[in-house]
């Protein structure tokens, strides 16, 4: 009986240790449903489809390589998902890392390259247009009360981000730099750098978090690359390589 009790205690400790060692990553495909996101001018490529394809492939690759990692997708189909609900999924699953996948667009048709964002207000004026465009999804939602009066089109609303400390900034920056290094070094994309911006979905996610802008569908050549299987595979491998380095540390 004593031996059985000792064995039971040992197994219980092992289970507890394994649970403490678990790692959860939440992958978010930006936009969806009635929110197409950015749309390419040449091929009409819709951001929501690109984001979802990359997110699902990335999730599959992580699951296949690291079965002990819990991988959660905020959406797996073409559905609209409020920004706050995306953050709620992150927090409900006690995520250790949050990766939000997006595609860029600009009035300047020559704009190209990849950039990776973390939460912050450094050079806020320079990045305000991107933050406003991504946060504007709020206006499509029926229930606006969860945003506590935040107006994505008002510069004054972004002052709140300056008043909040981001306890996950160092680790967010670490992962963002790993991602950006893959885009630039491995995929040979134009380097728009690691930047800070006031994204609601990053603010409300309680873990190291990044928002990846894979490239510009408003640029004809980049749209073609983003929509290609080669381009999507390269992006998936790049983000996966960054995840692998971060996870192994």
Image (cartoon, rainbow, N blue to C red):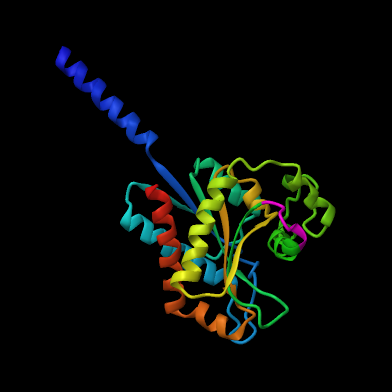
Q: Is residue 192 visible?
A: yes
Q: Residue furthest top?
A: 2
| Residue at the (25%, 27%) spot, across then down | 11
Pick whichever, 182 or 133, lies toward us. Answer: 182
The magenta segment is 120-125
Q: Residue at x 53, y 47 (%)?
A: 171
Q: How many marks?
A: 0
Asked whether 123 falls inside the magenta stretch, the response is: yes
Expressed as whole percent of the image width and height from the top left, the position of residue 229 reads 43, 78
Quarter of the image with the N terminus in it: top left
Relative image position of residue 16 (x, y in whole percent): 34, 29
Q: Please tell me whether residue 135 belongs to the stretch shown in magenta.
A: no
Relative image position of residue 131 (x, y in whole percent) = 71, 60
Is residue 105 found left or right of 125 in the rendered image? left
| 244 and 8: which is toward the camera | 244
Going 71% across and 56% down the picture, which residue do you hit?
141
Name the residue rendered at 55%, 44% in the picture: 207
Magenta stretch secondary structure, dominant? loop
Q: Position of residue 70 (x, y in %)?
A: 40, 47
Q: Is residue 76 visible?
A: no
The image quarter in which residue 237 lies: bottom left
Question: Is 19 rendered above or below residue 189?
Answer: above
Camera-side residue of 207 and 144 = 207
């Amino acid at each position: 009986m004593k031996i059985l009790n000792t064995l039971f205690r040992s197994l219980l400790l092992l289970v507890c240790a394994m649970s403490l060692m678990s790692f959860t990553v939440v992958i978010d495909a930006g936009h969806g449903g009635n929110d197409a996101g950015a749309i390419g001018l040449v091929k009409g490529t819709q951001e929501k489809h690109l984001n979802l394809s990359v997110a699902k492939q990335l999730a599959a690759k992580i699951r296949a390589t690291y079965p002990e990692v819990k991988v959660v997708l905020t959406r797996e189909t073409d559905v609209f998902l409020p920004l706050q609900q995306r953050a709620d999924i992150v927090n409900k699953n006690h995520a250790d890392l949050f990766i939000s996948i997006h595609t860029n667009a600009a009035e300047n048709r020559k704009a190209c390259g990849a950039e990776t964002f973390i939460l912050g207000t450094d050079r806020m004026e320079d990045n305000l247009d991107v933050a406003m465009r991504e946060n504007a999804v709020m206006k499509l939602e029926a229930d606006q009360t969860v945003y506590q009066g935040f107006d994505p089109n008002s510069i004054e609303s972004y002052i709140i981000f300056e008043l909040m400390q981001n306890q996950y900034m160092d680790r967010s920056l670490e992962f963002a730099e790993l991602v950006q290094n893959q885009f630039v070094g491995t995929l040979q994309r134009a380097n728009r750098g690691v930047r800070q911006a006031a994204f609601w979905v990053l603010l409300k996610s309680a873990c190291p978090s990044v928002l990846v802008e894979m490239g510009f569908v408003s640029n004809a050549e980049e749209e073609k690359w983003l929509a290609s299987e080669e381009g999507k595979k390269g992006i998936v491998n790049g983000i996966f390589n960054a995840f692998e380095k971060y996870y192994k540390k």
